[in-house]
């Protein structure tokens, strides 16, 4: 039996994809993926799931800060989104004549 440690984690979402959130507090919102964590199966979406972090001053004379930044969402809660047709869908892979893999949304073909 092969160990799971050496298996490379894969996501169905890539950086730059438009996605629609299909579950959770932000259900129905649309955003763009800015970062992925394949080993944790999480993605960070621009301006979605904003969290507040209070930073202490690092040196004397500095003031503290309140920083708002995006927190990751589980990749199973997002689906690829076609902005032109306004449809969220799964995808299938096909190979072009030049040999490159291409992702095609199932609902829009």
Image (spheres, rainbow, N blue to C red):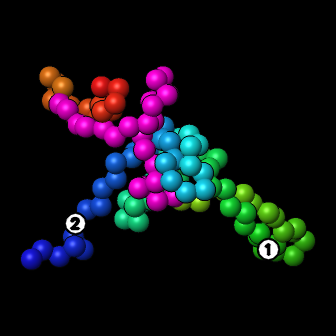
Q: Nearer the viewer, residue 13 or 67?
A: 13
Query: Between 42 and 35, which is closer to the camera in this rendering?
Result: 42
**Was residue 27 drawn as part of the magenta stretch in this picture?**
no
Q: Which residues are magenta?
A: 73-95
Residue for point 34% across, 53% down = 11
Q: Is residue 30 left or right of residue 76?
A: right
Q: Nearer the viewer, residue 65 or 40?
A: 40
User: Which image quadrant is residue 71 in?
Assistant: bottom right
Tag of residue 7: 2
- SS state under label 2: loop
Mark seen at residue 99: none
Q: Quadrant of the C terminus?
A: top left
Residue 21: % across, % down: 51, 47
The answer to whether residue 16 is left or right of residue 4 is right
Q: Mark 1 highlights which residue?
A: 56
Residue 53 screen position, x and y as percent:
72, 66
Using a 10 Å C-alpha cutoff, classify the residue at mark 1 as few (fewer than 14 neighbours), some (14 to 19) or many (20 or more): few
Residue under the image location 76 percent in, 70 percent down = 55
Q: Decide which of tag 1 and tag 2 comes sooner along the chain.
A: 2
Q: Work out whether residue 35 can be spotted.
A: no
């Amino acid at each position: 039996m092969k160990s799971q440690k050496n298996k490379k984690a894969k996501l169905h979402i890539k950086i730059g994809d438009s996605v629609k959130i299909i579950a959770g507090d932000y259900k129905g919102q649309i955003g763009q993926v800015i970062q992925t964590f394949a080993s944790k199966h999480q993605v960070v979406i621009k301006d979605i799931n904003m969290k507040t972090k209070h930073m202490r001053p690092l040196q004397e004379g500095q003031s503290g800060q309140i920083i708002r930044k995006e927190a990751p969402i589980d990749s199973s809660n997002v689906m690829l989104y076609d902005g032109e047709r306004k449809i969220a869908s799964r995808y299938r892979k096909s190979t072009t004549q030049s040999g490159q893999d291409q992702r095609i949304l199932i609902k829009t073909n």
